[in-house]
Image (cartoon, coloured by chain):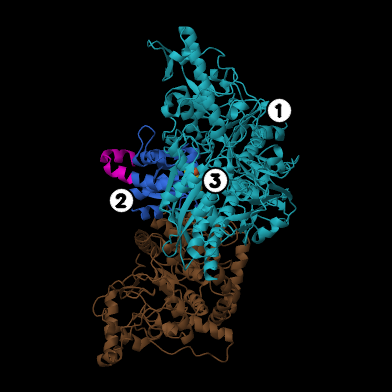
């Protein structure tokens, strides 16, 4: 138990310590991906701009082994495989002969958070360019040794080859710090037409272990001497621990320690189930003073619009020559919704000789390190955060909080590895939810049935309370030397937070978009997959259908009427065509067709979804029968991975849209398990989901992990309206609401 | 899919029916068994029905639980075809959508009303009393009209009726005429002027459309409700429908408020969560206005009456126990006690409020009921989640406990949580419950014994 | 001390008899496949096979396993010699985060053992206790169909060896 112990799976990678030599990290940037990235001076692309040294991204060992490093984390999206494809392609080595190391503060670049569908776009671009430049350096070195022009040499399978057949393996060519050079602004990338690995449906590297019971998750870590911990969370936000007699708990079998620090309460025991029993006893012994301070969950629309807000006009354009004749308005609402990871958050931490190592499924190892260091009053250099996969998170769930829990407990038991896993109820009650939102839309149609003016207002909290400091984490908020939660800030455009995708992609002569940013956060919230785009696209695309109906236009044709962007148009047409969409076509009785489209953040992947929904006329039960999506995410790296992401996005969005709402009374969160927070089960899975990819070889990668959420929601809502003739605007569109609308 | 075979042996039934018919006199039976056909009509267009009438019909259909019998899981609503196992064989429910050929499309309102009143179809055929016209005969003209309007505006579905599986002579419809002679008491409901309007409304619904007695009243050898034992508990789909009169086995006596809450929400803190066929009833009632539920409750309160001082005291005792720390009861059944402590108590003693916490079993009627069947059903199958709606979930233990383990558990539960004499033949009951559930599981997309969910049935 | 038969081997287990099987598998036997998802019998992440039937190990105490035989995903096959169900999930790339997948595979395996040719409806019905948050359902369904096919075409002896 001396010295850092590395998880088995990683040991393979870590074993060759030489890998890390001359590895340079730049800490200056990378924290805030939302900062405007427009730069006058030419900078290398993607995350190379902030971490410019090539050997931060690509290492070539003397034995020819090649490793690619990414500061991004594998969250189940298959990045690791995609990065491996990208690096193998540009380096001209076989896919199998390459390894990828993901986020670790001791080994990889600081790429901030793995979020916003930015990973392939930022990290993949960096790896691609770094790999191309590394290959160029290796070729140049070979040219020097052979005394031949570089143009005469080619690369193949990890070697540089001369026309006469002489060859140098990459390992032979690499010298000590040859790759420790800053990246050039531009690289000579391969011609997409010659791609061998990229664009191919490569089997994901992480799947074999996952389907055979290998150690694949932080939950599966077992370090020598490891003990288990469970936290007893307060019963509600802001509850104060008034008394807690721990003496009986301390005597329970296996109990190692009860940790109490202010309102932070945890118990450590040798075996996991002993810990759980002790946790139950500790929970029973703890007395809390609670404060009723939650809003009325049945009136969120009014609650949100009456909280103080900072209002900002984010789009204002006018053309007085165009005026509307028929005006329509509508308001849409969305409740708080949960990430609901299937595996509750977990972390392992160990403090050895003043160095705290935390294995975590966080989305940001560097920000997490910063926050944990601040919480523990340690220099960040003495904290190491290593990303290990967890259950899919879909944004900022309890991962960082669990990491903080583990670190705080590990400090109390130096040397001992501590594994903390949350209970289901804790995950459901304490994770930061996706914020509730309200939108109000108003638009007018001109005499030709085109939209003359468009007004869009959105009310929302911020959509990210990720650790910027200790105060973002529950443990730090609850300890006696409590850290206050940081002041929430709106996320800046063009990506935006609550206003993400609030600005329409369609062209309207007059348009006015206002973002009402609400600083007060009665319910703990943070980033949930696609942030505000889910609701804004749901609202925009629902309203487009409402307007199309008034204009007497076909929904697909109506969208095309207002869209110039050629890639967007193509995506819409592709989805419509794949679905068999026909103008004016009526669905069979009790069924409806719906369409939804968006370009995520107006700058990432394009996605259109057409769906067919059946609504039971007696019970109101909706069922997505089939969905057809088209997506353009630029150059495709792994088509099967992309399809998997889009399928998942549609199903998850369907679950949000039809079923999901966090519930609470005036004091406590009451949706604390799968009984009270129902999600999609197999009996509601559609018959078919088809995903069509519009590949754009040579075009930049466009993030696609979140692009499906909004369009899927809108297309389902539109299909329900088409099936029932009733428009529902208050998410989720539950069976009960549909039945009430039909019966009305 | 078959709801499950009844317990009465077929031979005995044949014997009894024939004997009864002999007593009535064959000639008399023939005399009453002939009914004229009512002329077919052209299917009326849905728009010809008054919308308010149709809406009232919707509520009435929910009270009548019509969808439960006339819809097969996974098939269109009201298209019929649900097999109903009776001691006389399997009878399939009919298509009551307005399809012209296979449904009610060509039925006039008069024909519909005759079916409700007299159990005769449009063509003049006698209907088997699995269609509870012995109750529906009480429904008023006005309500029949509303029901008719509702059904005739449903989506027409072409689905021919399936042949009933009955053997001679029970497949002869004249036999039914004899049955009617004995057991059908026609006439619409006569209000009791000494009682309140609400009470009368409740009585009208309970005795008529809601046909509560169809499950909760025991039946005689001929399958008719025993008039002398009204609401004394009956059997349905391998569940026991508890006595809901003064003999109710509920540990805490029912009150009007408790019943209202239970029918409204599907659970009550002093009684637990509705399950089995009752779950479906409660779910259907969810779209029925409070006033009708209150009326039903007002009438039922007079049926079960005020508890005897003894029952009242016992109920208070139970509530007292539940709220204090659980007493360690001596039990001869250590195995059952251990299973309970490890597998059940974590939820059932967690004090999480209903419906998402397990009910304290001292409050569960299943523990004090006459036999172990309901408890066995729940232990085996648990409670399954409703699609997309908050709903209690309990894992079933069919795969992890064998019959002996479940029997040990149930015997322990009985001794610990009720003051009733021990159950007999528990292991056999468990074995049978497992067998019938397996049949149900193999034949349906979802187990019949989950909280029934009519909304699940629209699945292809 | 209790003897527990897992994946064909007897193990001496030193845990309280009320310990749910899940913790015995993960903690005492260091098996990874069965996952903690809810501990409440609501999600299926912890599913294993006991005497041929899928059981939620998080709500099933050790004391119920006397004389029973437990199979976990590890007992079906390995990376080197995957069982048909494992091959099928790999071939269909039926995972996103994969956390739910082990439970899905055990639920499916139990179904295929008792019903080698299930219809799509039967598969959906059997998988109903299992939740997936990533939305991998379409692929899971395809993988189960594929596994059924693989099991039928596979050499019987292979199935025997890898399939319990
Ligand atoms: S962990 Fe066992 S069912 Fe969820
Ligand atoms: S693949 Fe992530 S939960 Fe199923």
On the image, numbered disc 2 is attached to which residue? C117
Q: Is residue A206 left or right of residue A416?
A: left
Give the magenta part as a residue range: C147-164
Q: Residue A107, located in which quarter of the rendered image?
A: top right
C161 drawn magenta: yes
Residue A321 lies left or right of residue B40; in this view the side is right
Q: Is disc 3 in the same subunit as disc 2?
A: no
Residue C18 falls inside the magenta stretch? no
Proximity of marks 3 and 1: CB atoms separated by less than 8 Å: no
Q: Is residue B441 left or right of residue A285?
A: left
Which of the pair B115/A404 is nearer the observer? B115
Q: Residues within 10 Å of mark 1 (few under 14, many from 20)?
A: some
Kindly identify which numbered label has been placed on residue A379. Answer: 1
Is residue C160 depicted above or below B132 in this figure? above
Per the picture, the main secondary structure of the magenta-coloured stretch is helix
Question: Hue of chain A?
Answer: cyan
Which chain hosts label 1?
Answer: A
């Amino acid at each position: 138990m001396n010295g850092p112990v590395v998880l088995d799976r990683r040991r393979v990678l870590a074993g060759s310590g030489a890998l890390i030599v001359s590895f340079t990290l730049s800490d200056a940037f990378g924290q805030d991906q939302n900062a405007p990235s427009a730069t006058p001076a030419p900078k290398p692309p993607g995350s190379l701009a902030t971490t410019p040294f090539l050997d931060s991204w690509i290492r070539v060992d003397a034995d020819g082994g090649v490793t690619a490093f990414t500061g991004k984390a594998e969250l189940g999206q298959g990045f690791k495989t995609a990065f491996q494809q990208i690096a193998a392609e540009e380096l001209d080595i076989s896919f199998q002969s390459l390894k990828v190391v993901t986020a670790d503060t001791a080994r990889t670049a600081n790429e901030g958070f793995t979020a916003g569908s930015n990973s392939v776009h930022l990290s993949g671009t960096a790896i691609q360019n770094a790999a191309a430049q590394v290959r160029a350096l290796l070729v140049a070195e070979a040219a020097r040794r052979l005394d031949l022009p570089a143009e005469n040499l080619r690369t193949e399978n990890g070697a540089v080859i001369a026309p006469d057949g002489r060859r140098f393996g990459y390992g032979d060519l690499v010298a000590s710090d040859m790759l420790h050079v800053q990246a050039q602004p531009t690289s000579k990338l391969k011609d997409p037409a010659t791609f061998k690995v990229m664009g191919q449906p490569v089997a994901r590297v992480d799947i074999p272990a996952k389907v055979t019971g290998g150690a694949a998750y932080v939950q599966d870590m077992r370090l020598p001497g490891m003990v288990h911990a469970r936290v007893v969370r307060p019963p509600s936000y802001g509850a104060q621990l008034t008394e807690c007699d721990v003496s009986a708990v301390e005597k329970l079998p296996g109990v190692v320690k009860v940790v109490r620090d202010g309102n932070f309460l945890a118990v450590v025991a040798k075996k996991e189930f002993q810990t759980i029993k002790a946790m139950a006893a500790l929970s029973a012994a703890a007395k809390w003073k609670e404060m009723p301070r939650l809003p009325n969950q049945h009136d969120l629309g009014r609650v949100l619009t009456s909280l103080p807000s900072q209002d900002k006009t984010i789009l204002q354009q006018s053309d007085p020559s165009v005026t509307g004749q028929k005006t329509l308005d509508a308001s849409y609402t969305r409740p708080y919704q949960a990430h609901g990871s299937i595996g509750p958050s977990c972390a392992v931490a160990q403090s050895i000789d003043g160095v705290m190592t935390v294995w975590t499924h966080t989305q940001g190892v560097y920000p997490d390190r910063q926050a944990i260091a601040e919480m523990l009053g340690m220099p960040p250099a003495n904290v190491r955060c290593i990303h290990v996969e967890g259950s899919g998170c879909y944004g900022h769930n309890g991962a960082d909080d669990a990491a903080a829990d583990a670190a705080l407990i590990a400090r109390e038991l130096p040397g001992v590895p501590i594994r903390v896993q949350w209970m289901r109820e804790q995950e459901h009650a304490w994770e930061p939810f996706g914020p509730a939102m309200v939108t109000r839309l108003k638009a007018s149609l001109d005499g030709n049935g085109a939209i003359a003016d468009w007004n869009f207002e959105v009310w929302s909290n911020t959509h990210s309370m990720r650790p910027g400091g200790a105060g973002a984490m529950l443990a730090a908020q609850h300890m006696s030397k409590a850290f206050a939660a940081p002041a929430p800030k709106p996320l800046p455009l063009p990506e935006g937070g609550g206003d993400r995708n609030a600005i329409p992609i369609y062209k309207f002569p007059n348009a006015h978009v206002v973002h009402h940013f609400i600083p007060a956060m009665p319910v703990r919230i943070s980033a949930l997959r696609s942030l505000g785009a889910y609701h804004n696209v749901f609202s925009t695309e629902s309203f487009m259908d409402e307007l199309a109906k008034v204009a007497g236009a076909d929904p697909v044709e109506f969208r095309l009427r207002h869209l110039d962007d050629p890639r967007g148009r193509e995506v819409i047409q592709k989805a419509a065509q794949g679905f068999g969409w026909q103008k004016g076509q009526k669905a069979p009785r009790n069924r409806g067709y719906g369409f939804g489209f968006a370009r995520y953040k107006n700058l990432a992947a394009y996605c259109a979804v057409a769906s067919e929904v059946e609504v039971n006329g007696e019970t109101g039960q909706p069922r997505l029968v089939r969905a057809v999506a088209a997506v353009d995410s630029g150059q495709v790296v792994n088509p099967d991975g992309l399809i998997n992401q889009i399928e998942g996005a549609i199903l998850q969005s369907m679950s949000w849209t039809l079923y999901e709402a966090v519930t609470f009374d005036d004091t406590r969160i009451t949706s604390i398990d799968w009984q009270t927070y129902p999600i999609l089960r197999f009996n509601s899975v559609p018959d078919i989901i088809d995903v069509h990819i519009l590949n754009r070889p040579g075009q930049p990668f466009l993030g696609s992990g979140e692009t499906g959420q909004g369009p899927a929601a809108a297309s389902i809502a539109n299909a329900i309206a088409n099936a029932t003739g009733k428009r529902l605007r208050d998410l989720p569109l539950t069976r009960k609401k549909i039945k009430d609308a039909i019966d009305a | 899919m078959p709801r499950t075979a009844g317990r009465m042996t077929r031979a005995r039934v044949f014997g009894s029916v024939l004997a009864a018919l002999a007593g009535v006199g064959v000639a008399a039976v023939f005399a009453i068994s002939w009914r004229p056909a009512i002329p077919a009509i052209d299917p009326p267009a849905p728009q010809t029905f008054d919308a308010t009438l149709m809406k009232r019909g919707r509520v009435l259909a929910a009270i009548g639980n019509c969808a439960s019998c006339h819809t097969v899981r996974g098939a269109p609503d009201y298209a019929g075809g649900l097999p109903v196992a009776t001691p006389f064989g399997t009878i399939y429910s009919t298509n009551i959508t307005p399809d012209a050929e296979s449904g009610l499309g060509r039925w006039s309102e008069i024909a519909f009303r005759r079916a409700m009143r007299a159990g005769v179809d449009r063509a003049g055929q006698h209907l088997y009393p699995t269609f509870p016209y012995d109750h529906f005969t009480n429904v008023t003209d006005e309500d029949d009209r509303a029901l008719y309007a509702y059904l005739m505006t449903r989506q027409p579905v072409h689905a021919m009726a399936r042949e009933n599986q009955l053997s001679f002579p029970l497949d002869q419809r004249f036999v039914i005429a004899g049955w009617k002679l004995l057991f059908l008491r026609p006439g619409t409901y006569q209000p009791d002027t000494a009682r309140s309007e609400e009470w009368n409304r409740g009585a009208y619904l309970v005795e008529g459309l809601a046909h509560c007695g169809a499950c909760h009243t025991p039946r005689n050898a001929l399958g008719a409700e025993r008039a002398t034992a009204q609401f004394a508990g009956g059997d349905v789909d391998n569940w026991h429908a508890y006595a809901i009169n003064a003999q109710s086995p509920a540990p805490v006596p029912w009150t009007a408020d408790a019943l209202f809450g239970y029918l409204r929400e599907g659970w009550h803190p002093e009684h637990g969560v509705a399950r089995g066929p009752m779950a479906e009833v409660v779910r259907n009632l969810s779209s029925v206005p409070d006033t009708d539920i209150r009326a039903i409750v007002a009438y039922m309160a007079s049926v079960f009456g005020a508890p005897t001082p003894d029952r009242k005291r016992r109920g208070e005792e139970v509530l007292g126990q539940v709220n204090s720390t659980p007493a360690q009861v001596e039990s001869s059944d250590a195995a059952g006690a251990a299973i309970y402590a490890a597998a059940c108590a974590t939820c059932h003693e967690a004090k999480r409020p209903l419906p998402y916490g397990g009910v304290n079993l001292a409050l569960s009627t299943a523990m004090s009921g006459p036999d172990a069947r309901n408890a066995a059903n729940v232990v085996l199958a648990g409670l399954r989640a409703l699609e997309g709606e908050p709903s209690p979930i309990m894992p079933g233990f069919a795969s992890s406990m064998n019959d002996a383990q479940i029997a040990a558990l149930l015997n322990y539960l009985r001794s610990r949580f009720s003051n009733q004499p021990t159950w007999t033949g528990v292991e056999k009951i468990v074995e049978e419950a497992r067998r019938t559930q397996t049949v149900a599981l193999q034949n349906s997309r979802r187990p019949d014994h989950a909280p029934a969910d009519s909304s699940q049935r629209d699945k292809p | 001390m209790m003897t527990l038969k897992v994946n064909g081997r007897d193990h001496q287990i030193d845990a309280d008899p009320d310990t749910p099987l899940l913790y015995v598998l993960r903690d005492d036997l260091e098996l990874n496949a069965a996952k903690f998802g809810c501990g409440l019998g609501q999600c299926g992440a912890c599913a294993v096979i006991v005497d041929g039937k899928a059981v939620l190990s998080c709500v099933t105490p050790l004391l119920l396993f006397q004389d029973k035989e437990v199979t976990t995903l590890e007992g079906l096959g390995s990376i080197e010699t995957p069982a048909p169900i494992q091959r099928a999930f790999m071939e269909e790339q039926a995972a996103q985060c994969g956390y739910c997948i082990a439970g899905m595979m055990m639920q499916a395996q139990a179904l295929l053992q008792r019903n080698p040719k299930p219809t799509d409806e039967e598969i959906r019905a059997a998988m109903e206790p299992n939740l997936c948050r990533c939305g991998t359902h379409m692929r899971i369904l395809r993988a189960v169909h594929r596994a059924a096919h693989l099991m039928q075409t596979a050499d019987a002896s292979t199935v025997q060896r890898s399939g319990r």
